[in-house]
Image (cartoon, grey):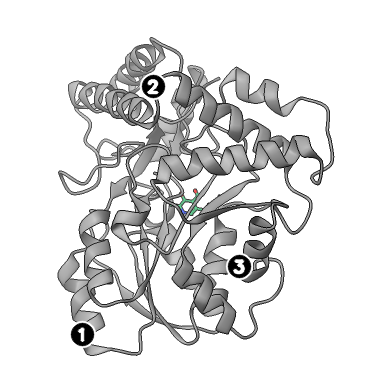
């Protein structure tokens, strides 16, 4: 199967090789060197001096950590689809009051909507934004939205699960307090590792927080990070080794701009091909994700029918998700995609659409 999934994505062979190495202790010099080298590379990707923690969980662990450590009572959540809704569920499950911004699906968050809420409700302590909504294939104008949140002096949590390592994010300049992702998306590493940067303001909030539990207590993570121990508990060593190999691979090829450009070019080739076939992507024009395409299925054809027919041809795409499950299918351009396979995949898709 050739993978054009939206995560987990296919991994570069060198990543899988690095993950197959013999184990060592997470307190050994070998692991500590690997850990901090990985952190250094991630700081470079995110353009930040903030601490970066490597959670033995997927990205959702950082949603839990954000609300438990940094929100006493009230959080504003911007929802563009299923993963924004996930943040709402996590916040509510942790007994927080959630204020919502939820434009129609496919429409990005507007700064004015954020300032309106922050203006009228000073009790809001933090704002959560999904940078790239994987369920609808939409990317939000994060730099502009961050500026608005910071103008009001609020904490900012950014779900960058399907954008970190795939498009530019400038954590320090944009003032992002917690910016998190998962290994299985743009980095092309198997699932099981959550990565996130945490600001001094987020750590200050964590110090004050009650009922924050232990596993995701950011103050504890910071203590271990600063003492040079890496993680408070056993680390997912193979995933960290895989992530390290992926980050070094990016560096060898010229750094983060190389990979951003690669994803942009792949995405452009896919979108041009889709339009040649007569297919259209779902989100508002100008806000299409550079890593995940959410594609409207032809009228009277279910998204899953296209997905299944492509599997029969040896291509694993992704089904529609959430509210768009029936009417769309999705196609990622992250991770290990061999040269020429976008072209052959688009040819197969053209045949499928013709036959349907
Ligand atoms: C935008 C976004 N946020 C959050 C998640 C949840 O990530 P994980 O399953 O790694 O916890 C996903 C997973 O697809 C996602 O795409």
Q: Residue at x 73, y 52 (%)?
A: 229
Apparent side of residue 216 relative to residue 145 in the rendered image (left or right): right
Q: Which mark is residue 218?
A: 3
Q: Secondary structure at mark 1?
A: helix
Residue 158 drawn above or below residue 283: below
Q: Residue at x 19, y 73 (%)?
A: 113
- Separation of marks 2 and 3 at Cα, in angstroms: 33 Å
- Separation of marks 2 and 1 at Cα, in angstroms: 43 Å
Q: Residue at x 47, y 45 (%)?
A: 43
Which of the two labelled residues, at mark 2 and mark 1, occupies the earlier sequence position? Answer: 1
| Viewer can see residue 164 | no
Which of the two labelled residues, at mark 1 and mark 3, occupies the earlier sequence position? Answer: 1
Of 151 and 345, the residue lying toward us: 151
Task: Locate residue 31, reporting x and y percent.
Answer: 74, 39
Q: Secondary structure at mark 3?
A: helix
Q: Are marks 1 and 3 in contact (CB under 8 Å)?
A: no
Q: Residues within 10 Å of mark 3 (few under 14, many from 20)?
A: many
Residue 240 drawn above or below residue 62: above
The residue that disc 1 covers is 119
Report if the beta carbon of the residue with label 2 is closer than 8 angstroms to ligand 1: no
Apparent side of residue 246 relative to residue 165 in the rendered image (left or right): right
Apparent side of residue 116 relative to residue 66 in the rendered image (left or right): left
Q: Secondary structure at mark 2?
A: loop
Q: Which mark is residue 254?
A: 2
- Separation of marks 1 and 3 at Cα, in angstroms: 29 Å
Of 95 and 147, the residue lying toward us: 147
């Amino acid at each position: 199967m050739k993978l054009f999934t939206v995560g987990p994505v296919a991994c570069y062979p060198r990543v899988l090789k690095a993950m197959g190495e013999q184990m060592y202790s997470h307190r050994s010099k070998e692991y500590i060197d690997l850990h901090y080298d990985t952190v250094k590379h991630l700081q470079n990707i995110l353009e930040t001096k903030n601490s970066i923690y490597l959670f033995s969980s997927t990205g959702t662990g950082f949603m839990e950590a954000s609300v438990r450590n940094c929100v006493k009572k009230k959080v504003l959540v911007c929802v563009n689809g299923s993963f924004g809704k996930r943040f709402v569920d996590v916040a509510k499950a942790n007994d927080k009051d959630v204020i919502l911004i939820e434009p129609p699906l496919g429409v990005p968050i507007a700064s004015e909507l954020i300032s309106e809420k922050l203006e009228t409700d000073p009790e809001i302590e933090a704002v959560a934004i999904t940078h790239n909504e994987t369920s609808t294939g939409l990317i939000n104008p994060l730099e502009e939205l961050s500026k608005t949140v910071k103008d009001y002096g609020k904490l900012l949590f950014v779900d960058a699960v399907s954008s970190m390592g795939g498009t530019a994010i400038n954590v320090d300049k944009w003032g992002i307090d917690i910016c998190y992702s998962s290994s299985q998306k743009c980095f092309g590493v198997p699932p099981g590792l959550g990565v996130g940067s945490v600001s001094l303001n987020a750590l200050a909030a964590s110090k004050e927080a009650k009922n924050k539990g232990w596993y995701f207590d950011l103050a504890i993570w910071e203590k271990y990070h600063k003492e040079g121990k890496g993680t408070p508990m056993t680390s997912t060593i193979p995933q960290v080794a895989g992530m390290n190999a992926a980050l070094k691979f990016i560096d060898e090829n010229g750094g983060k701009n190389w990979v951003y450009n690669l994803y942009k070019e792949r995405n452009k080739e896919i979108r041009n091909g889709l339009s040649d076939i007569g297919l259209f992507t779902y989100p508002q024009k100008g806000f299409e994700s550079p890593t995940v395409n959410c594609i409207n299925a032809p009228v009277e054809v279910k998204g899953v029918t296209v997905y299944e027919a492509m599997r029969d041809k040896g291509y694993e795409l992704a089904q529609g998700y959430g509210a768009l499950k029936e009417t769309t299918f999705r196609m990622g351009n992250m991770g290990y995609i061999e040269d020429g396979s976008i072209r052959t995949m688009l040819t197969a898709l053209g045949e499928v659409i013709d036959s349907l």
